[in-house]
Image (cartoon, helix red, strand yellow):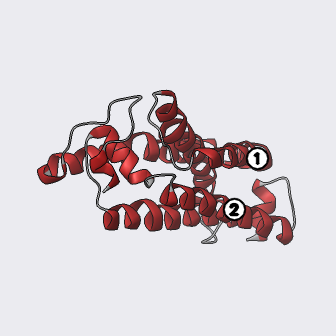
Protein backbone atom coordinates (compact mmCIF):
# COMPACT_ATOMS: atom_id res chain seq x y z
CA UNK A 1 0.00 0.00 0.00
CA UNK A 2 2.68 2.51 0.98
CA UNK A 3 4.66 1.69 -2.17
CA UNK A 4 1.62 2.52 -4.34
CA UNK A 5 0.83 5.65 -2.29
CA UNK A 6 4.36 7.03 -2.66
CA UNK A 7 4.32 6.35 -6.41
CA UNK A 8 1.05 8.21 -7.08
CA UNK A 9 1.17 10.98 -4.45
CA UNK A 10 3.58 13.67 -3.34
CA UNK A 11 3.83 12.02 0.10
CA UNK A 12 5.81 9.01 1.24
CA UNK A 13 4.45 8.16 4.68
CA UNK A 14 1.84 5.86 6.13
CA UNK A 15 0.67 8.69 8.38
CA UNK A 16 -0.13 10.91 5.40
CA UNK A 17 -1.92 8.04 3.66
CA UNK A 18 -4.12 7.33 6.67
CA UNK A 19 -4.81 11.02 7.32
CA UNK A 20 -5.94 11.50 3.72
CA UNK A 21 -8.06 8.34 3.91
CA UNK A 22 -9.58 9.52 7.20
CA UNK A 23 -10.41 12.93 5.72
CA UNK A 24 -11.96 11.27 2.65
CA UNK A 25 -14.15 9.06 4.83
CA UNK A 26 -15.08 11.98 7.12
CA UNK A 27 -16.00 14.32 4.23
CA UNK A 28 -18.19 11.61 2.73
CA UNK A 29 -19.90 10.96 6.07
CA UNK A 30 -20.53 14.66 6.79
CA UNK A 31 -22.03 15.21 3.34
CA UNK A 32 -24.15 12.05 3.40
CA UNK A 33 -25.49 12.86 6.88
CA UNK A 34 -26.42 16.38 5.75
CA UNK A 35 -28.24 14.93 2.74
CA UNK A 36 -30.09 12.47 4.97
CA UNK A 37 -31.04 14.82 7.78
CA UNK A 38 -31.88 17.79 5.53
CA UNK A 39 -33.52 21.01 6.68
CA UNK A 40 -37.04 19.82 5.85
CA UNK A 41 -36.64 16.64 3.83
CA UNK A 42 -33.83 14.26 2.86
CA UNK A 43 -32.12 14.66 -0.51
CA UNK A 44 -33.96 11.73 -2.13
CA UNK A 45 -37.22 13.59 -1.58
CA UNK A 46 -35.73 16.72 -3.19
CA UNK A 47 -34.54 14.76 -6.24
CA UNK A 48 -37.84 12.92 -6.46
CA UNK A 49 -39.86 16.13 -6.23
CA UNK A 50 -37.84 17.70 -9.06
CA UNK A 51 -38.92 14.94 -11.45
CA UNK A 52 -42.31 14.20 -9.82
CA UNK A 53 -41.46 10.94 -8.03
CA UNK A 54 -42.26 9.98 -4.45
CA UNK A 55 -39.18 8.07 -3.23
CA UNK A 56 -40.09 6.03 -0.13
CA UNK A 57 -37.87 6.66 2.88
CA UNK A 58 -36.71 3.05 3.13
CA UNK A 59 -35.54 3.00 -0.51
CA UNK A 60 -34.04 6.50 -0.26
CA UNK A 61 -32.18 5.71 2.95
CA UNK A 62 -30.79 2.42 1.64
CA UNK A 63 -29.68 3.86 -1.71
CA UNK A 64 -28.80 7.52 -1.02
CA UNK A 65 -27.49 7.16 2.54
CA UNK A 66 -26.15 3.66 3.13
CA UNK A 67 -25.34 2.52 -0.41
CA UNK A 68 -23.83 5.78 -1.60
CA UNK A 69 -21.74 6.18 1.55
CA UNK A 70 -20.33 2.65 1.30
CA UNK A 71 -19.63 3.06 -2.42
CA UNK A 72 -17.76 6.33 -1.90
CA UNK A 73 -15.77 4.86 0.98
CA UNK A 74 -14.77 1.91 -1.20
CA UNK A 75 -13.73 4.19 -4.08
CA UNK A 76 -11.70 6.36 -1.67
CA UNK A 77 -10.05 3.31 -0.09
CA UNK A 78 -8.96 1.96 -3.48
CA UNK A 79 -7.83 5.40 -4.74
CA UNK A 80 -5.75 6.29 -1.71
CA UNK A 81 -4.28 2.93 -0.66
CA UNK A 82 -4.18 1.05 -3.97
CA UNK A 83 -6.08 -1.84 -2.42
CA UNK A 84 -6.23 -4.54 -3.66
CA UNK A 85 -2.50 -4.62 -4.35
CA UNK A 86 -1.38 -5.13 -7.91
CA UNK A 87 -4.35 -3.54 -9.67
CA UNK A 88 -2.79 -0.16 -10.42
CA UNK A 89 -5.05 0.92 -13.33
CA UNK A 90 -8.10 0.37 -11.12
CA UNK A 91 -6.59 2.39 -8.26
CA UNK A 92 -5.51 5.24 -10.53
CA UNK A 93 -8.97 5.18 -12.11
CA UNK A 94 -10.45 5.53 -8.64
CA UNK A 95 -8.36 8.68 -8.05
CA UNK A 96 -10.01 10.16 -11.14
CA UNK A 97 -13.38 8.86 -9.93
CA UNK A 98 -13.05 10.65 -6.59
CA UNK A 99 -12.32 13.94 -8.37
CA UNK A 100 -15.12 13.46 -10.92
CA UNK A 101 -17.67 12.36 -8.33
CA UNK A 102 -16.91 15.18 -5.89
CA UNK A 103 -17.16 17.84 -8.58
CA UNK A 104 -20.24 16.42 -10.32
CA UNK A 105 -22.09 15.86 -7.04
CA UNK A 106 -21.42 19.46 -6.03
CA UNK A 107 -22.28 21.01 -9.39
CA UNK A 108 -25.20 18.84 -10.54
CA UNK A 109 -26.86 17.69 -7.32
CA UNK A 110 -26.44 20.88 -5.36
CA UNK A 111 -25.30 24.08 -7.09
CA UNK A 112 -27.41 23.63 -10.22
CA UNK A 113 -30.56 22.74 -8.28
CA UNK A 114 -29.95 25.68 -5.96
CA UNK A 115 -29.43 28.03 -8.95
CA UNK A 116 -32.68 26.72 -10.45
CA UNK A 117 -34.40 27.72 -7.16
CA UNK A 118 -35.09 24.22 -5.83
CA UNK A 119 -34.78 24.81 -2.11
CA UNK A 120 -34.15 23.32 0.41
CA UNK A 121 -31.07 21.50 -0.83
CA UNK A 122 -29.68 19.24 1.91
CA UNK A 123 -25.92 18.79 1.66
CA UNK A 124 -25.29 22.11 -0.08
CA UNK A 125 -23.09 23.53 2.68
CA UNK A 126 -20.72 20.53 2.71
CA UNK A 127 -20.01 20.76 -1.02
CA UNK A 128 -17.17 23.10 -0.06
CA UNK A 129 -15.48 20.05 1.49
CA UNK A 130 -15.98 18.07 -1.70
CA UNK A 131 -14.52 20.77 -3.94
CA UNK A 132 -11.58 21.30 -1.57
CA UNK A 133 -10.93 17.56 -1.61
CA UNK A 134 -11.10 17.39 -5.41
CA UNK A 135 -8.53 20.20 -5.67
CA UNK A 136 -6.40 18.51 -3.02
CA UNK A 137 -6.50 15.23 -4.99
CA UNK A 138 -5.50 17.03 -8.20
CA UNK A 139 -2.43 18.45 -6.44
CA UNK A 140 -1.43 15.57 -4.17
CA UNK A 141 -2.10 12.72 -6.61
CA UNK A 142 -0.88 14.46 -9.77
CA UNK A 143 1.76 11.75 -10.31
CA UNK A 144 -1.06 9.21 -10.77
CA UNK A 145 -2.21 10.96 -13.92
CA UNK A 146 1.29 10.64 -15.36
CA UNK A 147 1.41 6.91 -14.58
CA UNK A 148 -1.85 6.10 -16.39
CA UNK A 149 -3.75 9.06 -17.88
CA UNK A 150 -6.26 6.78 -19.63
CA UNK A 151 -7.28 5.02 -16.40
CA UNK A 152 -7.48 8.40 -14.62
CA UNK A 153 -9.72 9.89 -17.33
CA UNK A 154 -11.98 6.84 -17.43
CA UNK A 155 -12.28 7.00 -13.65
CA UNK A 156 -13.10 10.70 -13.80
CA UNK A 157 -15.81 10.11 -16.39
CA UNK A 158 -17.27 7.23 -14.36
CA UNK A 159 -17.28 9.25 -11.13
CA UNK A 160 -18.82 12.29 -12.77
CA UNK A 161 -21.17 10.21 -14.90
CA UNK A 162 -22.54 8.49 -11.83
CA UNK A 163 -23.91 11.78 -10.51
CA UNK A 164 -24.71 13.38 -13.86
CA UNK A 165 -26.40 10.44 -15.56
CA UNK A 166 -26.89 7.34 -13.44
CA UNK A 167 -28.62 8.88 -10.41
CA UNK A 168 -31.05 10.93 -12.52
CA UNK A 169 -31.61 8.16 -15.09
CA UNK A 170 -32.31 5.73 -12.25
CA UNK A 171 -34.90 8.06 -10.79
CA UNK A 172 -36.58 8.58 -14.19
CA UNK A 173 -36.62 4.81 -14.73
CA UNK A 174 -38.16 4.30 -11.30
CA UNK A 175 -40.80 6.92 -12.16
CA UNK A 176 -41.62 5.02 -15.37
CA UNK A 177 -41.83 1.67 -13.57
CA UNK A 178 -43.81 2.83 -10.52
CA UNK A 179 -46.89 4.79 -11.66
CA UNK A 180 -48.27 4.87 -8.11
CA UNK A 181 -45.24 6.95 -7.02
CA UNK A 182 -45.74 9.61 -9.74
CA UNK A 183 -46.77 13.11 -8.76
CA UNK A 184 -46.74 16.59 -10.25
CA UNK A 185 -43.22 17.96 -10.56
CA UNK A 186 -41.93 20.55 -8.14
CA UNK A 187 -42.33 24.06 -9.56
CA UNK A 188 -39.10 26.06 -9.36
CA UNK A 189 -39.02 28.77 -6.73
CA UNK A 190 -42.01 27.38 -4.85
CA UNK A 191 -41.85 25.43 -1.57
CA UNK A 192 -41.28 21.71 -1.93
CA UNK A 193 -44.66 19.98 -2.55
CA UNK A 194 -46.58 18.65 0.43
CA UNK A 195 -46.54 15.11 -1.01
CA UNK A 196 -42.72 15.10 -0.83
CA UNK A 197 -42.82 15.89 2.91
CA UNK A 198 -44.88 12.82 3.83
Horizontal side of residue 143 vs 57, given as left or right: right
Nearest the viewer among 118 and 13 is: 118
Q: CA distance from mark 2 to mark 1?
A: 12 Å
Horizontal and vertical percent for residue 90?
A: 56, 58
Disc 1 secondary structure class: helix
Tell me which corner region of the image, top left, top right, bottom left or bottom right, holds residue 168: top left
Query: Foreground mark, 2 or 1?
Result: 1
Disc 2 secondary structure class: helix
Quarter occupied by the C terminus: bottom left
Q: Residue at x 45, y 27 (%)?
A: 116
Please determine whether, in this image, residue 76 is positioned above or below residue 145: below
Horizontal and vertical percent for residue 102?
A: 59, 46
Tell me which corner region of the image, top left, top right, bottom left or bottom right, holds residue 192: top left
Nearest the viewer among 133 and 152 is: 133
Nearest the viewer among 78 and 175 is: 175
Which residue is disc 2 drawn over?
80
Q: Residue at x 61, y 59 (%)?
A: 28
Mark 1 or mark 2, which is nearer the start of the sequence? 2
Quarter occupied by the N terminus: bottom right
Q: Residues within 10 Å of mark 1 (few under 14, many from 20)?
A: some
Horizontal side of residue 160 vs 146, given as left or right: left
Discs 2, 1 touching: Cβ within 8 Å:
no
Which residue is disc 1 drawn over?
136
Q: Residues within 10 Å of mark 2 (few under 14, many from 20)?
A: many
Q: Residue at x 51, y 33 (%)?
A: 114
Amino acid sequence: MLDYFSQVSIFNSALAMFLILGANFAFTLVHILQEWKGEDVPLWRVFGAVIGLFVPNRLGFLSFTVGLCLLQWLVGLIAITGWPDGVRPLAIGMIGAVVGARLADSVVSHWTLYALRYRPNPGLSSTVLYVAEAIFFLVVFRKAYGHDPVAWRIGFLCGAGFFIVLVWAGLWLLRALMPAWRHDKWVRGEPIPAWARE
